[in-house]
Image (cartoon, helix red, strand yellow):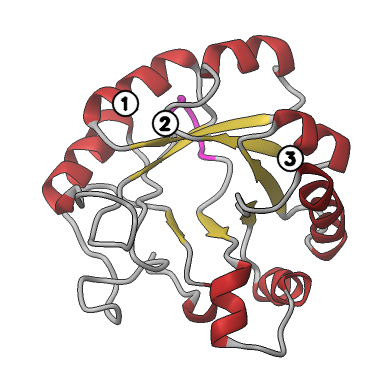
Amino acid sequence: MSATAGTAPFSLLAISDRVGLRRAAPRRSLPAWARTLAAAGVPALLLREKDLPDRAVHCLARTLRRRLPAPGRLLVSGRADIALAAGADGVHLPADGVPTAALRRRFAGALLVGRSTHTLDDVSAAAEAGASYVTFGPVFASPGKGEPTGLDRLAAACGAVGQCVPRVAGPGQGRDGRGPVHVGAPIRDAAGWRPHRARASP
């Protein structure tokens, strides 16, 4: 969900999950998956591997940067320093992470600054702080992600700032895990984790 005036920086955000990828496609590495995303025209990838040490995240980010060349956007979860060092395009902050405004002041023009949101108040706060975009959700039930927000609150969040990157069980998937998301709001963008089922609904 774009939190600022104008066009959102991307219309689809793929989110890495190397453990899930290994289960779904044991012979495919995360860099190979990123290369497939780039070939398919996926415009952005968020590196989100919280269990890895800093050095490994940096190394992986540099590798992904080569696999996802411009105009593809690469973001790193929670670490602006690693994003800068690896040549990534931005950082994605958790809902309880470093204040958006502080990073915008420090890195304006150098990094996209995105944020996860789970409530309408979160969305408003991120917009006021100048976030480049926000994700909102989870829209549907997703393991370890808390109570789903549902389509009504997603519609309200989209109405508040105009463009949406809903956090769903998989990119553009509906409640049954197969169909696209449809809601009465200007949802233009999508984000999701399931790398082996990456598809989106316009």
* Lateral position of residue 148 relative to residue 91, left or right: left
- Give the residue type at disc 2: Ala
Say if 96 sits above or below 179 in the image: above
C-beta proximity under 8 Å, tags 2 and 1 = yes
Q: Residue at x 50, y 18 (%)?
A: 130
Under tag 3, what secondary structure?
Answer: loop
Q: Residues within 10 Å of mark 1 (few under 14, many from 20)?
A: some
Q: Residue at x 24, y 36 (%)?
A: 157
Point out residue 80 in the picture as x, y percentages from the top left corner: 71, 30
Q: Nearer the viewer, mark 2 or mark 3?
A: 2
Magenta range is 3-8
Does the magenta run of residues contain 65?
no
Point out residue 111 in the picture as x, y percentages from the top left corner: 71, 29
- Give the residue type at disc 3: Asp
Q: CA distance from mark 2 to mark 1?
A: 8 Å
Under tag 2, what secondary structure?
Answer: loop
Q: Nearer the viewer, mark 2 or mark 1?
A: 2
* Lateral position of residue 35 relative to residue 130, left or right: right
Sequence order check, earlier mark of 2 and 3: 3
Q: Which residue is identified by label 2?
A: 95
Say if 191 sits above or below 118 in the image: below
Q: Quadrant of residue 41?
A: bottom right
Q: Residue at x 40, y 14 (%)?
A: 128
Q: Which residue is identified by label 3?
A: 89
Q: Which residue is identified by label 1?
A: 122
Q: Residues within 10 Å of mark 2 (few under 14, many from 20)?
A: some
Q: Quadrant of the N terminus?
A: top left
Sequence order check, earlier mark of 2 and 1: 2
Point out residue 164 in the picture as x, y percentages from the top left corner: 36, 45
